[in-house]
Image (tube, rainbow, N blue to C red):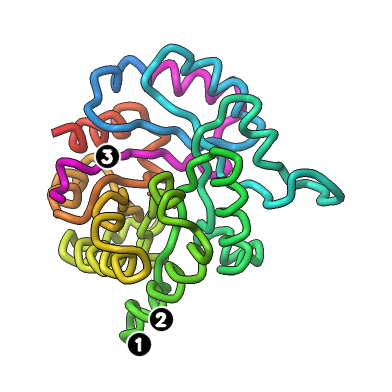
Amino acid sequence: MDKAKRKAIIAGNWKMNKTPKEATALLNEITPLVKDADCEVIACVPYVDLAAAIEATAGTNVKIGAENCHWAASGAFTGEISTGMLKEIGVEYVVLGHSERRQYFGETDETVNKRTKAALAAGLKPIVCVGELLWERECDITEEVIARQIKLDLWDVSEEELKNVVIAYEPVWAIGTGKTATADQAEEVCAFIRAQLAKLYNQDAADAVTIQYGGSMNDGNADELLSKTNVDGGLIGGASLVAEKFAAIVKAASK
Ligand code: PGA
């Protein structure tokens, strides 16, 4: 299956930025700029912005995602948000296993897997993030790290469920640092991820999965990164907070 048959997806990851009012204002800027996009466009926003974001994007081609979710349906998990809560208000996507959650909030492959399975069971589409630390790349174990994350994070996810999974390859050393992986580095690891999926499932299933690159992707480098065969989209942090930059990346993915 060639790249053209996979869904290109550009997703903004707003992280801990924008109040609900600011979210509405930014989405009001973004939506007209991306209305003719020939790719899926998503904004993943803080929990408290979700309702405002869904309202601001109603009737547009911009979908809304959350930045995490818990695996339990309900219960004594102070500060957590369930998949059912997200579903009920109209959230479609959820970022899981972002390196900032792994680094600062004790996220492990086991908990990423639990969240991924819960999201899929609820009908949410998880954007599962994987990526190596700089130290791991320097020690030449990038492939071991990625293979382990893919296997564990997707443990017990069926081939049918895989159709709703998006993978984001985000080398940790490239996130928010201005240091982008070269297009060849991104392609190498995205192709490796697809090969792992082919091993765990089969080639057809692997060929259908959208694999994004994330890490200092911007309006200046998106074209080159997205030209690569196995780079099907982007998970965009900093540049997703500036409407023109985000729209330029969406345009690059629409070619
Ligand atoms: P960045 O973040 O584009 O600011 O590097 C990407 C991400 O963390 O998803």
Which x, y percent locates residue 13?
46, 42
Within 8 Å: ligand 1 and the Cβ of disc 2?
no
Callout 1: helix, strand or loop? loop
- Decide which of tag 3 and tag 1 comes sooner along the chain: 3
The residue indicated by pointer 3 is: 7
- Labels 1 and 2 touching (C-beta < 8 A): yes
Within 8 Å: ligand 1 and the Cβ of disc 3?
no
The residue indicated by pointer 2 is: 135
**Which quadrant of the figure has residue 170?**
bottom left
222 w.r.t. 47: above or below: below
130 w.r.t. 79: above or below: below
Amino acid tagged 1: Cys
Callout 2: helix, strand or loop? helix
In front: 61, or 194? 194
Amino acid tagged 2: Trp
Quadrant, the C terminus: top left
The residue indicated by pointer 1 is: 139
